[in-house]
């Protein structure tokens, strides 16, 4: 059997680890390459043109390293750049978007909140998603300011983080929201802080597993295939030592990390 082709992942920083973690033993041992564009994070504060330019450079870099499929492990980059990437590159490009559709299926109060960056929420893609799947429910949107920066700093559970989460979510909880769409890949790492504010009884919808399910289908992997660990290589436009520490802390991953040369 020929060895499986590498798969490239990228995000503005460490958020994409919340997607990568579901691929570690789920893609038949294919090597996984991960780029954290930390020197340019957060993407949510950048223009669509800048995010498209970074996404193109990184995709080209990942293809040069041997990737034969790309996972845009970032809602913001998907919203701003996935169409441009698909028109330029021929490999499969898997994007991600706020999981309104699954949220609409699990909410009992018919009241859902989408937590995302301003870039994602302002995009045409998001407007289409909302009008396709959010008609029968009440959809609240929150730009969760400074959450991405906190995760990038490795701050997941300090009093400052609790205050940031409380400021956004306590009013939604009061309104009866019972389902929170984690519409930014950094946010699953804040799940304990989110639960501390809104309680254990609510749904937190993380699209990471579904994205890897879609990747597996695109790669033609069989549902019954046995788990097989993938080697991982990390790259960053920021500090390699810091990214390695984050990989260990956030997803228990120990992998070599190189500077991103684009
Ligand atoms: N993790 C990203 C997302 O899913 C981007 C956050 C940012 O850089 O603003 O949207």
Image (cartoon, rainbow, N blue to C red):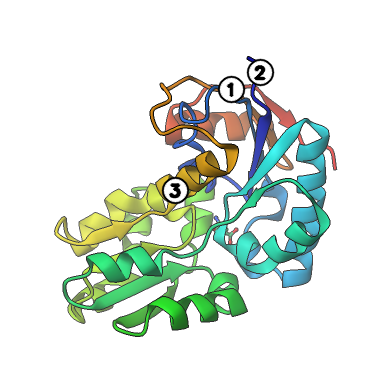
**Residue drawn at x 23%, y 74% as measured from the top left:** 177
- How far apart are the alpha carbons under marks 3 and 1? 20 Å
Cβ of disc 1 within 8 Å of ligand 1?
no
Q: Can residue 241 be seen in this view?
A: yes
Query: In screen coordinates, is 107 left or right of 216?
Result: left
Residue position for label 2: 3
Q: Check whether the beta carbons of the residues at disc 3 and disc 1 lie within 8 A of each other.
A: no
- How far apart are the alpha carbons under marks 2 and 1? 20 Å
**Residue 207 sits in quarter:** bottom left
- Depth check: give the residue in front, 71 or 217: 217
Upstream in the sequence, badge 2 or badge 1? 2
Q: Where is residue 22 in the image (x, y as percent from the top left)?
A: 44, 37
> Which of the two marks, 3 or 1, is nearer to us in this view?
3
Residue position for label 1: 255
Query: In screen coordinates, is 64 left or right of 199?
Result: right
Residue position for label 3: 208
Upstream in the sequence, badge 3 or badge 1? 3
Q: Check whether the beta carbons of the residues at disc 2 and disc 1 lie within 8 A of each other.
A: no
**Residue drawn at x 72%, y 71% as measured from the top left:** 48
Q: In which quarter of the image is the C terminus?
A: top right
Upstream in the sequence, badge 2 or badge 3? 2
Residue 155 against residue 251 in the figure, above or below: below
> Which of the two marks, 2 or 1, is nearer to us in this view?
2
Q: Position of residue 206 (x, y in %)?
A: 38, 54
Q: Can residue 155 be seen in this view?
A: no
- Depth check: give the residue in front, 120 or 134: 134
In this view, which residue lies farthest toward the top? 1
């Amino acid at each position: 059997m020929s060895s499986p082709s590498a798969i490239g992942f990228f995000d503005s920083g460490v958020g994409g680890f919340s997607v990568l973690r579901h691929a570690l033993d789920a893609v038949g041992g294919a090597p996984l390459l991960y780029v954290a564009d930390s020197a340019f994070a957060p993407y949510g504060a950048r223009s669509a043109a800048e995010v498209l330019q970074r996404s193109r450079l990184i995709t080209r870099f990942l293809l040069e390293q041997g990737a034969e499929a790309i996972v845009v492990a970032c809602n913001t980059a998907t919203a701003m750049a996935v169409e441009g990437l698909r028109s330029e590159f021929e490999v499969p490009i898997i994007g991600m978007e706020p999981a309104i559709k699954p949220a609409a299926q699990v909410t009992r109060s018919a009241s859902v909140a989408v937590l995302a960056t301003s870039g994602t929420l302002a995009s045409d893609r998001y407007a289409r998603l909302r009008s396709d799947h959010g008609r029968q429910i009440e959809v609240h949107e929150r730009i969760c300011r400074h959450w991405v920066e906190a995760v990038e700093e490795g701050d997941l559970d300090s009093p400052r983080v609790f205050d940031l989460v409380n400021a956004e979510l306590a009013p939604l909880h009061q309104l009866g929201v019972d389902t929170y769409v984690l519409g930014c890949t950094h946010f699953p790492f804040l799940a304990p802080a989110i639960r501390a504010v809104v309680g254990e009884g609510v749904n937190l919808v993380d699209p990471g597993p579904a994205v890897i399910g879609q990747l597996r289908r695109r790669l033609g992997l069989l549902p019954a295939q046995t788990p097989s660990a993938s080697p991982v290589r990390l790259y960053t436009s920021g500090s390699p030592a810091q990214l390695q520490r984050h990989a260990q802390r956030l997803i228990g991953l120990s992998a070599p990390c190189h500077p991103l040369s684009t």
